[in-house]
Image (tube, rainbow, N blue to C red):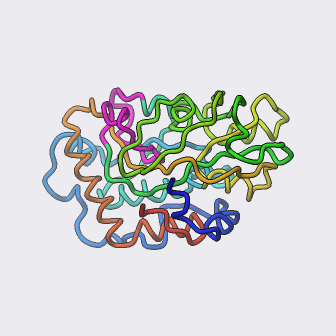
Amino acid sequence: MKAMRYSAPFFVVLLILAACQSGGSGSPGASEAAGAKVCDGETTGHLKRVCDAGKIVAFTDPAYPPQSSLNEATGDYEGFDIDVTNEIAERLGVEVEFTTPAFDAVVAGDWAGRWDMAVGSVTVTEDRKEILDFTVPYYFTPAQMATFEDSDIQSIADFAGKTACVGAATTYLDWIEGSLTLTAEAGEVSDPPAGLVSTTLPTDIDCADAWASGRTEFEGWISSITTVEGAIADDYAIRKVGDPIFFEPLAVCFDKAAEDGASLVDAVNQIVQDMHADGTLTAMSEKWYNGIDLTTN
């Protein structure tokens, strides 16, 4: 298991996640509109349609901090994924229009042109690659099990025969059901405890909210460690259990059924590679994850 890739300070420092920071379109390391935009050049297919429209419609989850959330005070979306989306659009030379369909609609494919891309912490799996196109991963996160604060559970093995809450259509659900097909770059995946079953809610943080409202029909919660640590920092009465169960490569994705879609996929894939190379993604990760760089595996 790759849990030893991170030392103890990684988990301690994430307790102070900067989920309350302003996301905005600006971020440390973001490009300052250097050079020509992609849409200034010759374009074809899906990329041309985006350039001609002057905007790219992008999926986001409005309740998945610190990756993405709606700031009710400002009315703006903010978070790591939001900064990444805005920077991609900046380098394309278009505006962003965010849309918030259910996550299961995103990973089901066949978007019918309702949105152009998803920068929503979508894990690359072999099954998803049959219906979605992916860029190179823009970051990697550990999948973490958690329980409520006064639970008797002390280890991952203690979840045997119990119920864990997960977001609908997530890799966490696949892991419980034994159908997870991560790509090779994810590394080793631990086995779920015998008899562990799932219950699903629309998005991951809903599980923690359910505990906060007094629901006790499930003993576990599985999400990205960034979201679990963010909930702890926000005073949810929960705690982590054990080491990460697997590591997720997360990438921008596109509907494989989109007409002439390769042009947009190729353009965004190059942008993501450039953002790795020039330090933009590292700076964004360090901003939202309190100094931690999650952009390399």
Using the image, determine if residue 56 lies above or below residue 173: below
Magenta region includes residue 125:
yes
Using the image, determine if residue 255 lies above or below residue 287: above
Give whichever of 275, 175 is nearer the camera.
175
Using the image, determine if residue 27 lies above or below residue 239: below
- Please indicate whether residue 70 sits to the left or right of residue 140 in the image: right
Residue at 57% in and 52% down: 76
Tell me where the magenta segment starts and ends, as one range.
Answer: 108-133
- Please indicate whether residue 35 sits to the left or right of residue 22 in the image: left
Residue at 47% in and 30% down: 179
Residue at 50% in and 65% down: 285
Magenta region includes residue 61:
no
Q: Position of residue 204 (x, y in %)?
A: 62, 40
Residue at 39% in and 49% down: 251
Q: Position of residue 137 (x, y in %)?
A: 37, 53
Give whichever of 213, 40 is nearer the camera.
213
Q: Position of residue 30 (x, y in %)?
A: 41, 69
Give whichever of 271, 172 is nearer the camera.
172
